[in-house]
Structure formats: C-alpha cells, structure tokens
Amino acid sequence: MADLYCRVDADVAGRQGVCKASGRCCRFEEYGHRLYVTHAELIYFYATYLQPGINPANNDHEADTAALPRTAGFPLPLYKGDGEFAPGCPWQVQGMCTARDARPLGCRIYFCDADSRGWQGPVYEYWHQQFTAIQARFGIDYGYVEWRHGLSLLRRALADPIAGQAGVATGRDQE
C-alpha cells in the first residue's frame, strides 16, 4: 500500500494540483462533500496509526498535537455529544492533517483548486481500481464506506476485536 500511495502522490504531483492548506477539504459538512475509502485503505490506516501499541502522538506530523485529548487513538473526537459524527475529519488538528502518511486516496487527489477539477475524477477512478485490485489479490471483501463510518468500525474493532472484525470485513455497522 505504501508503494501504491507513493505512485499516487507522484501522479498527482505531476499534475500540479495546488493545495492551499486551508483545511476545507477535511471539513466535510462545511465544504459539501464526503470522503469514501476502500477496506484496503482502512486496513492500511489501521496498521499505520491505530494498531495496538502505536501512539499517534509519536507521528512527526503530530508534534504540536501531543497534548490534545485522544480517544481510542484518535487525535480529535469522532462523535459529537448527540452521537452524530463530529464535523470533519478527526485527524485534522488545528487545520492540518495529522495522518498524512496513511491518508486515504481521496485526500491525496482532491484539492480546493478549481483548476484541478478536470483531472480529479478520472485520476481517482484509475487509482481506485488499483486499490480494488489489491483488495482482490489479498482476499479482502470489496468495501467502500464513508471515512468516518469506517473509522467507527476500526474504533469498535480496537475495543472489541471479534465484533469489529465482522464489521470491517462486511462493511456493516455492528451496533
């Protein structure tokens, strides 16, 4: 997966998309979109940031966030008090991504830059097919879920590995 993400990054860099580091892309409700990920991306994210024994505060990109309260390895809360998802990505802290190494495909391809919109869709589809092929190669059931829903499944898997495995494998919420 790391190699595939490097190839995605090289492809996108060659297209010269402009990231203004505004963080709008991570504030899903405010910006009017959703981020979807494959099961392979969730598994890679888990292995990189959420696997037991890994402390996200040790990530180089999180040096300024070590003092923030963490819930099950998440730098910011996944849910609001009413049980709904908190707005935006829980890995965006103080306007910056704290999970850059394992950030999903959509985070690597989509920019606020209007000049990038013409190539984003086709490029995303191409690389999504590559991730789908990896899932098939390793016998991972195809799954494509909203980012925060996938994170909630991972968090549940951390709390209850048996129930969580079933949720990630099928993409169904176990509550």
Image (cartoon, rainbow, N blue to C red):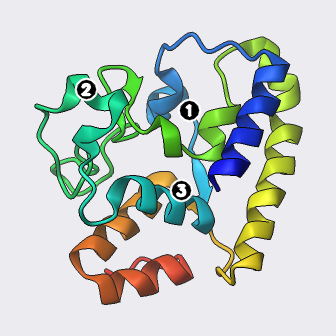
* CB atoms of marks 1 and 2 within 8 Å: no
From the viewer's side, name the closer residue of 95 and 47. 47
Crowding at dot 2, Cα within 10 Å, few <14 / some 14-19 / many 20+, comes out as few
- Disc 3/disc 2 C-alpha distance (Å): 28 Å
- Position above or below: 100 against 63: below
Mark 1, Cα crowd under 10 Å, few <14 / some 14-19 / many 20+, is few
Q: Residue 63: give its label.
A: 2
Q: Earlier in the sequence, mark 1 or mark 2?
A: 1
| Residue on which disc 3 sits | 146
- Depicted 53 relative to depicted 71: above or below: below
- The residue nearer to you, when weighing 134 against 142, is 134
Identified by mark 1, the residue type is Gly
Which image quarter holds the C terminus? Answer: bottom left
Secondary element at image label 1: loop
Disc on the earlier residue, 1 or 3: 1
Query: Which amino acid, mark 2?
Result: Ala
Residue type indicated by callout 3: Glu
Say if residue 75 shows up in the picture: no
Identify the residue at horizontal 44%, vertical 87% (top origin): 166
Per the model, the C-alpha gap separating discs 1 and 2 is 30 Å
Q: Is residue 92 visible?
A: yes
Q: Which mark is residue 32?
A: 1
